[in-house]
Image: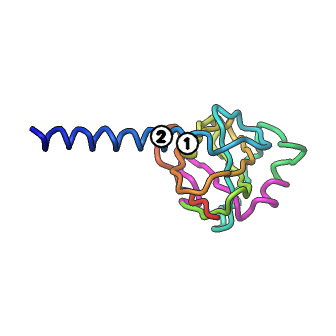
């Protein structure tokens, strides 16, 4: 009986730590400029891999903070995650804390893009610029399915 009680206590302690970690990190992202509609907070930043530059379809959502889609493509060419058929490209990216990234939906329908516990509702061919505030590794999903990963470093 004492072994069973100890296992229960350990399980409760693990759940408490996981719950606390969730509460601390759920607001790690905060929106900056963009044409996406934030469902919650989300900020991202990048220092790495080249994203594709497929600009065949112009965004239907207009400009962001005075920046046109073409300006954003040029400014964030190496810090952009492009979503086509809910697949993020590049599939992973390493970022510096507080840097900015472009989240770019190239589909003809809107999608909910989530980074960790935070999400954006991006319109069809919509995009947004975001900044990641918290160091860590985050799964990026598109409409609930795996799309890419983001590693934010100091």
Task: State yes or no: residue 66 in magenta.
Answer: no
* Residue range of the region highlighted in magenta in the rendering: 71-91
Residue 147, compared with residue 27, is above or below; it is below
Looking at the figure, which quarter contains the N terminus? top left
Query: Which quadrant holds the C terminus?
Result: bottom right
In this view, the residue farthest toward the left is: 1
The residue tagged 2 is 20
Residue 64: x and y in percent read: 83, 42
Residue situated in front as seen by the camera: 88 or 92:
92
- Asked if residue 32 lies left or right of residue 107, the reply is right
Marks 1 and 2 sit apart, C-alpha to C-alpha, by 6 Å
Q: Which residue is mark 1?
A: 24
Q: Which mark is residue 9?
A: none
Q: Nearer the viewer, residue 106 or 143?
A: 143
Q: Position of residue 142 (x, y in %)?
A: 54, 42
At a point 74% along the width and 55% down the height, the residue shown is 100
For numbered disc 2, what is the local secondary structure?
A: helix
Q: Most extreme residue toward the front, as rendered?
A: 2
Residues at marks 1 and 2 touching, judged by CB atoms closer than 8 Å = yes
Locate residue 124: give its quadrant. top right
- Label 1: element kind: helix
* Residue 120 image point, x, y percent: 64, 38
Q: Residues within 10 Å of mark 1 (few under 14, many from 20)?
A: few
Residue at 81% from the left image edge and 49% from the top image edge: 69
Give the image's coloring scheme.
Answer: rainbow
Q: Tag count in the figure?
A: 2
Q: Is residue 153 left or right of residue 23?
A: right
**Residue 8, picture quadrant:** top left
User: Does residue 79 show up magenta in the picture?
Assistant: yes
| Residue displayed at 60% across by 38% down | 119
């Amino acid at each position: 009986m004492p072994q069973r009680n100890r296992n229960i206590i350990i399980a409760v302690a693990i759940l408490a730590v996981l719950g606390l970690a969730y509460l601390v990190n759920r607001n790690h992202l905060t929106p900056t400029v963009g044409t996406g509609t934030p469902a919650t907070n989300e900020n991202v930043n990048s220092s790495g891999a080249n994203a594709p530059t497929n600009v065949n379809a112009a965004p239907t959502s207009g400009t962001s903070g005075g920046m046109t889609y073409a300006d954003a493509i040029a400014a964030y060419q190496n810090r952009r995650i492009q979503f086509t058929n809910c697949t993020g490209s590049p599939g992973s990216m390493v970022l510096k804390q507080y840097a900015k990234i472009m989240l770019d939906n190239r589909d003809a329908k809107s999608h909910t893009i989530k980074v960790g516990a935070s999400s954006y509702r991006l319109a069809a061919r919509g995009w947004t610029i975001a900044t990641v505030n918290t160091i860590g590794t985050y799964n990026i999903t598109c409409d609930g399915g795996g799309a890419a990963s983001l590693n934010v470093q100091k």
